[in-house]
Amino acid sequence: MRKKYKNLYVFIITIMFGITMFSSNVLAHSLTPWAKMYTKQKAGGYYHFAIGDWYHPNGKIVSYYWANSTVKSYFSTAIVGGINMWDGIIGIKETESKNAQMKVSYNPNIAADTAAYVVCTLPSNGHYEPGGVTTEMVIGNITKYSQTDKNKVLGHELGHVWGMEDLYDVNKNLSSIYANPYFYPKATQGDRNGIHICLNNPWYYASGPDRRAKYQKAPGVWAKNETLIINGKSCRFDANGFLVE
């Protein structure tokens, strides 16, 4: 269930699917054009991911701090296991509260059917202005979950930080940890394609052994019959938009 208030977003997901998205109080870039194209209602076919229109950090590393020693003792292993599901595409760094971008806390007394919730207070000067965001991820009473499932819950949530949207409420059969959070041992190729977009590095890799790559210059605009300099590297694309090595 999702409730929206003026300048305050509260995100709650049932215990079956774990906790949901939160954002960072650092400089952010807009995902609005991508979110309009890659909605969860359109997910399927080649695109087993969806992009959410909310704050997220620039860069691949987010710093965080634990609210207290209890939550750290319960979930320090899980947050590492969760980030490892992303194979190094995104990362986290524990730090002091004064330097952190997000807070992680624990409340075992929230509703029994809710694994966790996130409160994100938006700045008065608009959704994608720098700074002014306060975010807290509150983990519910999932201490009796297996370690593997704890990892998956936090891995799922860490993708939300960068802009990944849930899919299970529209299609539970997609190949994504956002459609079926507990089925996959790590982020799928679709999930990673979505994260590439969220990182302003919009590569698309086909599933399967060849993992052929395409590149989107803008939402839905693919590089074709051209050579581009991307991240300092010359990349040539054929008529079908595939990268030519």
Image (tube, rainbow, N blue to C red):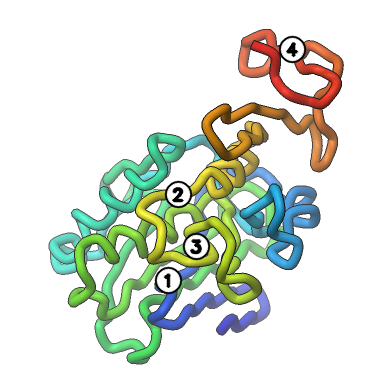
Q: Given this view, does label 3 or label 4 mark the residue nearer the observer?
A: 4
Q: Amino acid at mark 1?
A: Ile
**Quadrant location, the C terminus:** top right
Mark 3 and mark 4 lie on one chain; the one further toward the N terminus is 3
> Which residue: 80% across, 17% down?
238
**Quadrant location, the N terminus:** bottom right
Horizontally, residue 124 falls left or right of residue 116, namely right
Q: Which residue is mark 3?
A: 22
> Which residue: 26% across, 80% down?
141
Q: Give the number of the disc on residue 187.
A: 2
**In the rendered structure, are the residues bearing label 3 and label 1 in contact, judged by CB atoms less than 8 Å apart?**
no
Identify the element where label 2 is drawn: loop
Give me the C-alpha separation between circle 4 and circle 2.
Answer: 28 Å
- In terms of image quadrants, where is residue 93? top left
Q: Given this view, does label 4 or label 1 mark the residue nearer the observer?
A: 4
Q: Which residue is mark 4?
A: 236
> Which residue: 70% across, 29% down?
214
Mark 4 and mark 2 lie on one chain; the one further toward the N terminus is 2
Give me the C-alpha separation between circle 3 and circle 2.
Answer: 18 Å
Q: Given this view, does label 2 or label 1 mark the residue nearer the observer?
A: 2
Question: Does 1 appear above or below 171?
Answer: below
Q: Which residue is mark 1?
A: 19
Horizontally, residue 51 falls left or right of residue 225, namely left
